[in-house]
Image (spheres, rainbow, N blue to C red):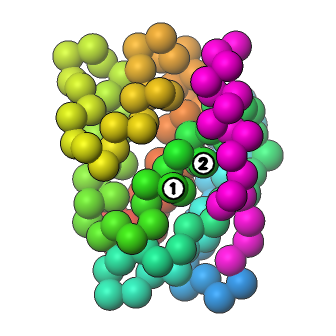
């Protein structure tokens, strides 16, 4: 177990319900049983607040924690693009170069490809909201 992943997952600032949410999405990983729920406050195509909850492994929790932190105050369209590219970042040929997403390199990397489905679950859950 990577200590960096544990450290990221331990940051639970956004692991919470948002009472006045405008959008909610929930998904379950059929391979391992992880569940993730994402709640947002969206206004003028911008994410103002991001909360998540789940019954999931530490990789999924770390992914949700990072994603929640980088999503606040970002445009819906930018996050939709990120969700589309996230799976590709596990390939060594495609690097995360955007400054605003650089923190994802701690988790989305070739060494974690065996946990790819767990790491991508929060992205897929968010994608259900930001793709509309």
Give the image location of residue 42, x and y in percent.
Answer: 45, 81
**Which part of the image, by quadrant, shows the N terminus?**
top right
Q: Residue at x 49, y 50 (%)?
A: 67
**Which part of the image, by quadrant, shows the C terminus?**
bottom left
Asked if residue 56 lies left or right of residue 22, the reply is: right
Q: Is residue 36 above or below residue 108?
A: below
Does residue 21 appear in the picture of this structure? yes
Asked if residue 82 lies left or right of residue 114, the reply is: left
Give the image location of residue 112, x and y in percent.
Answer: 51, 17
Q: Is residue 9 magenta?
A: yes
Give the image location of residue 117, x and y in percent.
Answer: 54, 30
The answer to whether the residues at label 2 and label 1 have Cβ atoms under 8 Å apart is yes
Residue at label 1? 69
The numbered mark at residue 29 is: none
Where is residue 95, by image quadrant? top left
Where is residue 89, by image quadrant? top left
Q: CA distance from mark 2 to mark 1?
A: 6 Å
Where does the magenta region start and end?
A: 1-18
Asked if residue 51 lies left or right of residue 91, the reply is: right
Q: Residues within 10 Å of mark 1 (few under 14, many from 20)?
A: some
Give the image location of residue 71, x and y in percent.
Answer: 43, 60
Q: Is residue 93 above or below residue 87?
A: above
Q: Residue at x 63, y 36 (%)?
A: 8
Does residue 30 appear in the picture of this structure? no
Q: Residue at x 73, y 71 (%)?
A: 17
Most extreme residue toward the right is 55
The numbered mark at residue 65 is: 2
- The local secondary structure at tag 2 comes to helix
């Amino acid at each position: 177990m990577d200590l960096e992943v544990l450290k990221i997952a331990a940051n639970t600032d956004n692991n919470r319900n948002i009472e006045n949410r405008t959008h909610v999405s929930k998904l379950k990983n059929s391979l391992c049983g992880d569940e993730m729920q994402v709640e947002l406050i969206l206004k003028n195509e911008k994410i103002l607040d991001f909360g998540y909850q789940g019954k999931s492994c530490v990789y999924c929790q770390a992914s949700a924690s990072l994603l929640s932190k980088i999503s606040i105050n970002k445009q819906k369209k930018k996050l939709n693009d990120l969700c589309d590219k996230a799976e590709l970042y596990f390939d060594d040929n495609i690097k995360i170069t955007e400054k605003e997403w650089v923190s994802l390199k701690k988790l989305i990397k070739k060494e974690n490809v065996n946990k790819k489905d767990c790491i991508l679950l929060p992205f897929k859950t968010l994608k259900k909201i930001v793709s509309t």
